Amino acid sequence: MIFREVEDRDLIAQARQGDVEAYNLLVSRWEKRIFNYLLRLVSNREDALDISQETFLKAYQNLRKLDDPARFSAWLFRIAHNEAFSLLRRRKPESELSEPRPRDFGGRLLPIELSLAVESAFKVLSEDQREAVLLKVYQGFKFNEMAEILEIPVSTVKSRLYTALDLLKATLAPAVFRKDGGMAQ
Amino acid sequence: MSCKLEDRRPDWKSYALGELDARARQEAESHVAACADCQDELAGLRVTLDAMATLREEELPRRIAFVSDKVFEPRWYEKLAQAFLRPSFAAAGLIAAAILIHAFVRPVGAPNTTTAQVDTRAIEARVTADVTARLQNQMAASVDTAVNAAVTKAVAETEKRDDHRTALLLSASERRYSDAADFLNKQVTRIYALNTGAGVR
């Protein structure tokens, strides 16, 4: 864990008393994680940035409603989740028209290609599955925190995540497993 | 070969994702050491997770800023309260109140002597001079504030334009990077296909 001179909870307390600079510091600590989570979820940089902005704005406006400052990250991701799915729901008819298909990444891949293969493999996942992977694998939340963010039971969290991992494993298999049975480096 | 534990085999996904408690983790590790089937499953999961770790984290095209956001400006009643609490405003108010009190509280039946008239004029002159000086100071301060606000606004606009320009440049660079990656991928795929005789895709 990275040492922080001032803890988030102190900044939250200051921000609640109207200290905008304290809130700005909180934003600078969390903006990259929120942006990347949203970017993978909505697959558009400008949308991800707009929703990030909206997320931090709503968080500021509702900071007094946060009961436990120790749960700030889950609470912040909950807001981001709501904002993202609000956009995705508005876009649904459009996204249903274009069915994303994973690219063919047969053979061994270079690291940069592997990264592209992973990006492509994400497209086989549903939004719910993709979000479960993002929260667990890329944001490091525990199952119970994910359940809190997504407002679903832990069993549903596990179900979504496990299905997503099976799909990713199958999709990435040609790229990460060598034909001789070994694994690509 | 299949795992002898069958349905009771360890939850390898939870294991790989760091969700098992210490005891379950230890049991799983003891089991996997002697079970080829579970070794395969765990290895497959690890390779998939390693592949996922190659996905790079992206930088924000521009910072999220709040200080200049209108939503954080004080509301009208807060501005009004702040204006009344400003020292120069309060001082001017006190002087005005003193003049009014002086005008109304002067004894009605008091002899209107020459000395008394001279004193009143002198006091009013002093008060007027004082108020005028304070108003001039306040006006100068207001001008300073307005100038500072204009400069701040101009700087903010310039920064906004610069941010926009940077975002455009970044976006163009990313497009070039994406095109290059696509081209590279096609080339590698083609070379691989040629080498393996699988045909050109």
Image (cartoon, coloured by chain):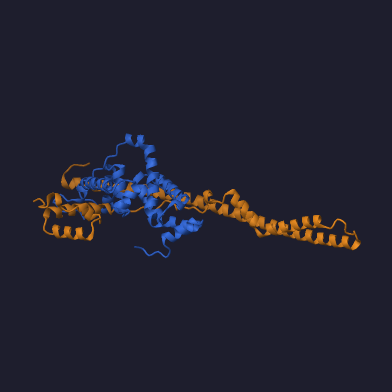
Chain colours: A blue, B orange
Q: With B65 as the anchor, is B43 left or right in this view? A: left
In this view of the protein, which residue sits in the foreground, A94 or A145?
A: A145
Between residue A172 and residue A52, name the one nearer to us. Answer: A52
- Can residue B184 be seen by looking at this rendering? no
The answer to which of A49 and A65 lies nearer the viewer is A65
Report the number of numbered marks: 0
Give the residue at x 39% y 44%: A82
Q: Residue at left 29%, top 37%?
A: A99
The image quadrant where one finds the C terminus of chain B is top left
Residue most extreme to the left: B1
Q: Is residue A31 left or right of residue B93?
A: left
Given residues A101 and A50, the one toward you in this image is: A50
Residue B101: x %, y % from top left: 77, 56
Measured as percent of width and height from the top left, residue B73 is found at: 55, 51
Residue sitting at x 84%, y 62%? B122
In this orientation, does residue B73 appear? yes
Q: Is residue A68 left or right of residue B126?
A: left
Vertical side of B45 occupied by A123: above or below: above
Residue B18, quarter of the rendered image: bottom left
**Can you give x and y, in whole percent of width and height, for residue A120 in the image?**
28, 45
